[in-house]
Image (spheres, coloured by chain):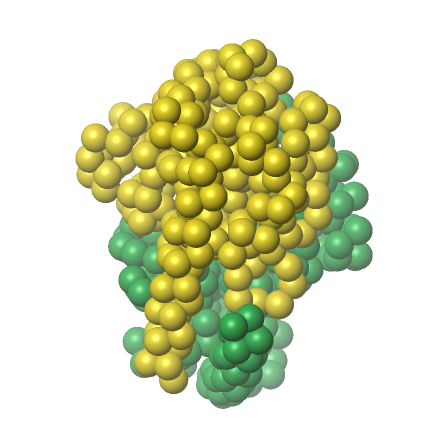
Chain colours: A yellow, B green
């Protein structure tokens, strides 16, 4: 049974790669950069996005958000109040795709997105440190958000996720003095599993470091516009 | 393709149920109670177990631990220093089962466990709020650990997980004054998705509430011994 299962999974990943490539072509045609934001549940992705979108750190970059959730639209509702186009994707009931977004789910949302009117699409993935890392969606870059409340061992425990990203955001820095989290140890573990990866130290609660995320996103969007 | 995928998934869940039943028979024969502990990454499962196992809150209950991780044995190493039998299960590389434990993985560990010499088997699942809820492993009860650092919206965002348990542990209570977490709102959401479920408020860091978890586990073990 195990062999059959692996075979099916390989087929699914192959199909995903093909659809991710098709998504990529549509994004390129419209000059849209896409960032896939991943983390464990409750690491603060939505609060960070609220902070970034509410400020003016993105300059003239026009943004839309694709919200991935197992169920409901709590996060999408929070972001929609910021007058940014938000599309909700629910990964549904039956097992077999609900713990992550895949290229086909993102593809199904494209008709709802006015790609020609945006520069940057932010995709907030389902909170999960395992499967989202395995499914490309046609993005330019992946951001991994890790909260200091989760502990400094996480890069060693979920190495694929920490490897499958171009930027690691260490969030909830305001909690550092209240938790058993050794920042140097965390950064050492990160360097061990993904040498040289960029990281930013931030607090979505206080706003510390949020401007730097904005600057990083603006650079990403600029590269997309240059390609179009 | 979707239909095929769902079909394969149904087969996998059926197979899992059959194997979970076989595990259950072995546990019953030995009079062992089994608890499946689930949470998001970094919610504090291992630290709670350290606290419980290091103290004398379990009275004479003989415990073994099965550690589920994608990779490595960090948590197992921490617990092994407490002189409790610990078996590590790594859910491996290839996709298709790595984000959760299933009944067959637990079954593969049974030969390493001296079931006749224990009363309670604690299974620490992979940190994930989606898939572990769908795979029974032959357990008597499931505990869901949720940290206040994750936010009070989690029962609404991951309802299946909060429904698929007999006890919800609200951990990191020591952080309550430092995070935007409304305990009453959380408990209201919990009651909405799983009316009447038991909950305990604890802090693995300070030890608050840990004795109550121990008492809960002793009652569970007593029921197992009574059945044998």
Specify the quadrant that holds the C terminus of chain B.
bottom right
Task: Determine whether A147 is above or below B90 in the image.
Answer: above
- State the count of labels: 0
Q: Residue at x 43, y 52 (%)?
A: A22
Q: Is residue A37 visible?
A: no
Q: Is residue A120 visible?
A: yes
Q: Is B184 displayed left or right of B201 in the figure? A: right
Which corner quadrant of the image does residue B222 belong to? bottom right
Q: Is B59 displayed left or right of A193 in the figure? A: right
Q: Position of residue A186 (x, y in %)?
A: 30, 32
Q: Residue at x 60, y 80 (%)?
A: B226
Q: Position of residue B10 (x, y in %)?
A: 56, 79
Residue in front for this viewpoint, A224 or B207:
A224
Q: Is B87 displayed left or right of A144 in the figure? A: left
Task: Determine whether B193 is above or below B135 in the image.
Answer: above
Task: Determine whether A154 is above or below A48 in the image.
Answer: below
Q: Residue at x 72, y 35 (%)?
A: A77
Q: Position of residue B209 (x, y in %)?
A: 60, 43
Residue in front for this viewpoint, A178 or B38:
B38
Which corner quadrant of the image does residue A50 belong to? top right
Q: Residue at x 57, y 75 (%)?
A: B3
Q: Position of residue B49 (x, y in %)?
A: 45, 52
Residue in front for this viewpoint, B138 or A142:
A142
């Amino acid at each position: 049974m195990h062999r059959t299962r692996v075979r099916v999974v390989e087929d699914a990943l192959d199909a995903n790669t093909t659809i991710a490539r098709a998504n990529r072509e549509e994004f390129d045609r419209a000059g849209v950069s896409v960032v896939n934001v991943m983390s464990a549940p409750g690491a603060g992705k939505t609060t960070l996005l609220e902070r970034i979108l509410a400020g003016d750190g993105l300059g003239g970059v026009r943004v839309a958000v694709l919200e991935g959730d197992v169920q409901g639209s709590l996060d999408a509702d929070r972001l929609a109040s910021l007058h940014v186009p938000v599309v909700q994707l629910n990964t549904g009931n039956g097992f077999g795709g609900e713990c992550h977004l895949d290229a086909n789910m993102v593809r199904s949302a494209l008709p709802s997105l006015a790609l020609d009117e945006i520069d940057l699409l932010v995709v907030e993935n389902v909170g999960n440190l395992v499967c989202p890392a395995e499914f490309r969606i046609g993005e330019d870059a992946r951001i991994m958000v890790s909260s200091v409340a989760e502990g400094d061992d996480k890069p060693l425990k979920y190495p694929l996720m920490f490897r499958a990203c171009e930027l690691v955001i260490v969030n909830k820095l305001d909690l550092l003095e209240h938790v058993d989290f050794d920042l140097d140890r965390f950064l050492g573990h990160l360097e061990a599993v993904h040498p040289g990866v960029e990281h930013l130290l931030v607090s979505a609660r206080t706003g510390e470091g949020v401007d730097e995320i904005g600057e990083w996103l603006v650079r990403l969007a600029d590269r997309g516009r240059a390609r179009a």
